Image: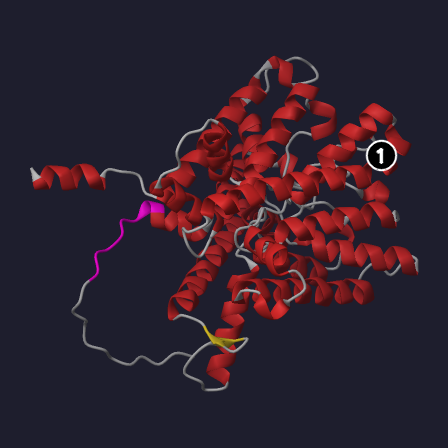
Amino acid sequence: MQKKNKSLKNKHLNSFQIIIIGFFGMILLGSLLLMLPISSQARTVTPFLDCMFTAVSATCVTGLVVRDTATYWSLFGKAVILTMIQIGGMGVITIGLAIMRLSGKKIGLSQRSTMQDSISAPQVGGIVRLTGFILKTSALIELIGAALLAPAFIRDFGVAKGLWYALWHSVSAFCNAGFDLMGVREKFSSLCTYHDDIYVNTVIMLLIIVGGIGFLVWNDIGTHKHKLQKYSLQSKVVLLTSLVLIVLPAVYFFFCEYADLTFGDRFISSVFQSVTTRTAGFNTQDLAQMEESGTLIMIMLMLVGGSPGSTAGGMKTATIAVLFLAAITVFSRRNDVQCFKRRLPEEAVRNAAAILFTYLTLFISSGIVISRIEGLPLLTCLFETGSAVGTVGLTLGITSTLSSVSRVILMVLMFFGRVGALTLIYAALPSSESIKSKLPMEKISVG
């Protein structure tokens, strides 16, 4: 009887498996809705693979598209896509818990644990309160963003359409999705027509940054305000790393790219490119005109992505920060990885190394495969795979021309990038029971 009970217990889904099933279920539902004739402006059935690609891109807040969002999808189709962006940005589990709270159902320990893993919270305690904080803050920021964008879009598209465009782009920017409706001017043009509009650029950038720094950082800011010394170590690391990853690339883009632009246009384009490259997916300049060195820097930024527990994907800023600190520890011959007068656990370093290895392996191998299949330059294909696995959505213009096999590869990368490397690994591999005995140790030379 005990063995039978243990067997039944082992069949229960862990939180990582629930997260994956939730995202996959949302993608499948969105795909089926987009296939309906009412979802396209032509009132025709869209091929399943195109719908699936769009649903994966929206739910995984990426922004890669094979059909121009503004001109192909109807108002119903756009509403489905925006809903998937919102749920994907907040997280399927977050939305699920919110629905449970509204329906009056009790949230048990297992649901709280799943939510903890979903947003990378340090502890289960206070997770329900944190969920409410996330939903309220997200709604408030998106509404403020829409209100700020409304004057510019009303000026260009009229009142009704302008308000709709303001709401769409506010949600898309905050969720780091990169989906736009500017195809009414030129297909797949993103925000290029606003390249010299400092106001629109600034609002979009602020929404991207706020959405990409993470829910836990918001909570720290809301709790401690300007008292930085009281912030958690993660918040300090995320804020510092994010600042560095915005400033340094912007300086490079300013001095090494966009030489034919005026000073003001060059400045705003450089900063915007630095901000949007880490998972947002909007662009205000023609990316195909960039130098190869600039393209490579963008690929690196796309792989880093946003921060843990945010609307963004990628390896995450904290991962890169931990690896950098680990390298500094080796160079200085210290025993412990340290940051802001705190020691980091060895588990964090191991996890960061595993994430880096996994992302690089998928990114490079997928790029090589697509390059061979499509007969395209390797750097162009690496840009596409980096954009997919980092859930960015930037492209050099090849997405809509790719074959079915290449699109499936990109879909897998987008799903992997949004759900997370460790989530997928922990869901697929059973947890090993703790073993008290240890194997003999033997040294091995590296480097």
Q: Is residue 326 magenta?
A: no
Q: Dividing the picture into quarters, in which one does residue 269 lie?
A: bottom right
Q: Amino acid at mark 1?
A: Phe
Q: Residue 258 location, x and y as percent? A: 84, 58
Figure check: 142 above or below 317: above
Q: Nearer the viewer, residue 208 or 186?
A: 208
Figure check: 328 above or below 141: below
Residue at (57%, 67%) from the top-left corner?
A: 230
At mark 1, the secondary structure is helix
Q: Residue 349 location, x and y as percent? A: 43, 68
- Quadrant of the image for the N terminus? top left
Q: Residue 431 location, x and y as percent? A: 27, 52
The boundaries of the magenta stretch are 427-434
Say whether residue 321 is left or right of residue 252: left
Mark 1 closeness class: few <14, some 14–19, many ≥20 residues within 10 Å? many
Say whether residue 357 is left or right of residue 407: left
Residue at (50%, 45%) from the top-left corner?
A: 129
Q: Residue 53 location, x and y as percent? A: 56, 32
What residue is shown with label 1?
153
Extreme right residue here? 262
- Quadrant of the image for the C terminus? bottom left
* One can see residue 418 in this view: no
User: What secondary structure is the stretch in magenta mostly built from?
Assistant: loop
Q: Nearer the viewer, residue 229 or 39?
A: 229
Q: Nearer the viewer, residue 440 or 168?
A: 168
Extreme left residue here? 1
* One can see residue 271 in this view: yes
Extreme bottom residue here? 333
